[in-house]
Amino acid sequence: MNGSLVTTLECLPNEIFITLFSYLDGYSIYQSFYELNNRLSGLVRCTMGKYLDLREIQRHKCQQVLASIDQSQVTELLLSNKYDDELADRLLACSFQGLRYLTLECVGVFTVSDIIYRKLIPNYLESLSICFRSDQCREKVHELSMGLLKICSRYLKSLRYLNLYTDFNPEMVNRNARIKNPIDNDLSCQCFHLTTICLNNLHWILSHLPCLRSLTFIATLDTWTDSYPPLPHLHTCIATLI
C-alpha cells in the first residue's frame, strides 16, 4: 500500500474534478472553484459551460461568468427575468453557438417578442421552454404563442421539445381566442406542451404536429370536424377539453 496520502484538494487528479463538476451547474462550479489557482481556473473554463443555470443570478455576476468561459460550449441555458426585466434578451445576444436547450422563465410578452424578432434563438435549438409572467394579458400571451409557433415552423427545423406556459393563474386560460394566422409548415416537435394557455383548435394541433410523441394541451373540441388526423407516433397525451 502506498504510504502517501492525499491531504489537499490540489493533489486530486483532473479526472476527479471533471467528474465532480458533472454533478454541478455552471454557476456553482464558477463560484466554488474559479480563481482558486491557475489549474482549477483552467479546468473551470474547460468544463463549466455545458449546463449554465443563471436564473437566480444578478446581471453583473452573469456577465462575470460569461466573460470567463467559452460561450460556444454552452449547450443548455436557463435564464429568468425575475429580478431584471432585460436580463434574458441581453444575455441571449451573446454568442451561444452550441446552444441546444433553452429555458426562459418569468418573461413578459415584450421580451419574448424582442427575442423572436431579433432572431436571438438559434435555428438549431432542440428544446425551448418559455414561462410567461402571470401578470401578462391573456390575449397577448395567446397571440404571441401563436406567433412563436409560426416562427418555429419556419426557422426552428431541429426543434423537438416545445413547452409554453404561464405561472399558475386560472385567468390566463383563454377560452375565446381563435388561431388567425396560418402556420407555414409542419412543426418538427416530438413533445408539445401548453399549460394555462388554451389552443382552441384541436384539429390544427394534430394537423401541424405529425411527429408528436408527447402532447399536453388545453383545447375546445371542434364541432365542425368529424374526425381528427391520426398521430401514429403519439404515445402520451394529457388533454383538458373545454
Image (tube, grey):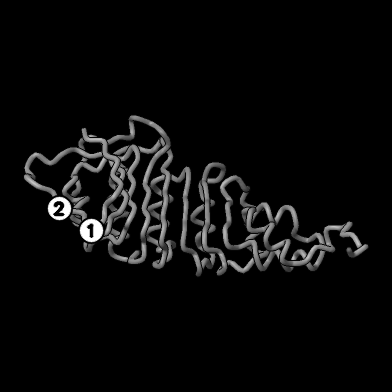
Residue in the picture at 62% in, 53% down? 25
Up-down relation of residue 191 to residue 166 (above or below): below
46 shown above or below 169? below
Q: Position of residue 175 (x, y in %)?
A: 23, 34
Q: Point out which mark residue 210 bears.
A: 1
The residue type indicated by label 1 comes to: Pro
Residue count near mark 2 (Cα–Cα under 10 Å), binned few <14, some 14–19, many ≥20: some
First reached walking from the N terminus: tag 1 or tag 2: 1
Q: Residue at x 34, y 30 (%)?
A: 170
Point out residue 40 in the picture as x, y percentages from the top left corner. 77, 64
Structural crowding at the residue carrying mark 1, measured as other residues with C-alpha within 10 Å and reported as few (<14), some (14–19) or many (≥20): some
Picture residue at 43% right of the left edge, 65% below the top:
122
Going by the image, does 38 lie left or right of 134?
A: right
- The residue singled out by tag 2 in the image is 229
Amino acid tagged 2: Pro
Query: Where is 224 relative to 181, above or below?
Result: above
Residue 11 coordinates in the image, percent (x, y) = 84, 63
Q: Outermost residue toward the top?
A: 170
Quarter of the image for the C terminus: give it: top left
Residue 121: which quarter of the image? bottom left
